Image (cartoon, grey):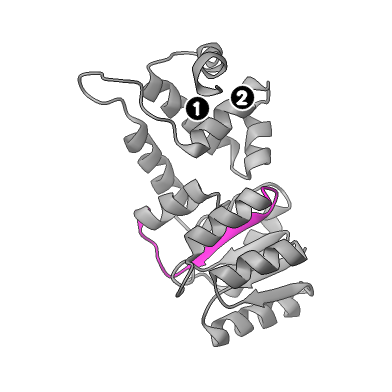
Amino acid sequence: MRILIVDDHPIYAEGLRNLLRSRDYRDVEVARGGEAAVELARAWGPEVVLMDISMPGMDGIQATRLIKAESPEVQIIILTSLGDSESLIEAVRAGASGYLVKTLGGDELIACLEGLRDGKNPFSAGLEDELLSELRRSSAPRAGGGPTPELSPRAREILGLLAEGLTYKEIGARLFLSERTIKYHIEQIKRSLGLESKAELVDFWRHEGGA
């Protein structure tokens, strides 16, 4: 597993690299900021990126968005001191596969990396439920009706794959999200659009959303 650590604090980044190498993750590189991360991801092709958020210049959210746009297969795990819901939502919308707070221990981090091999998306305790709650609130239909809401890039991506005939599990594997998260996305997209079935979603996408 090729792992790229992105953090502007040299002591933390080097300590994390030493931890990973001590656990037999030998192919580990470090980038000191967002711009360097994008360049190194392009040149080196990591499989997993451990991405901090708060960095000077290009922050981790921007870097995540750019790396995923060029290399959708890369799994980007946010590793940050920020545990607020706004940062969590922004990171997932940018394409992050997981979100970990830096208070976790070394053994926990290694367990999260091992879980990636089994398709598990790592979130610090309580954050996945918080994410799903935020998705429900943000996708709830507005009072009084109104025009069809604009779909987010993630919603469009999910609907496009659904229209291709992929199952929820297959969509989750493609986007590095859990099947549970995909199901919630689908349910909230249906609520937002006022639709009731998967067939109606596919029909909507083919006639309107996918244009």
Residue at position x 30%, y 25% in the image:
141
- With 188 as the anchor, is 137 left or right in this view? left
Q: Does the segment drawn in magenta span residue 74?
A: yes
In terms of image quadrants, where is residue 116?
Answer: bottom right
In terms of image quadrants, where is residue 179?
Answer: top right
Residue position for label 1:
186
Q: Which residue lies furthest to the bottom in this view?
A: 11
Which residues are drawn in magenta? Answer: 71-85
In the image, residue 24 lies at what x, y percent? 79, 74
Q: In which quarter of the image is the N terminus?
A: bottom right
Q: Nearer the viewer, residue 39 or 46?
A: 39
Q: Is residue 138 above or below residue 86?
A: above
Secondary structure beneath label 1? helix
Residue position for label 2:
162
Mark nearer the N terminus (1 vs 2): 2
In the image, residue 13 lies at what x, y percent? 59, 80
Residue at position x 26%, y 20% in the image:
146
* Type of the residue with mark 1: Ile
Q: How far apart are marks 1 and 2 (CA)?
A: 9 Å
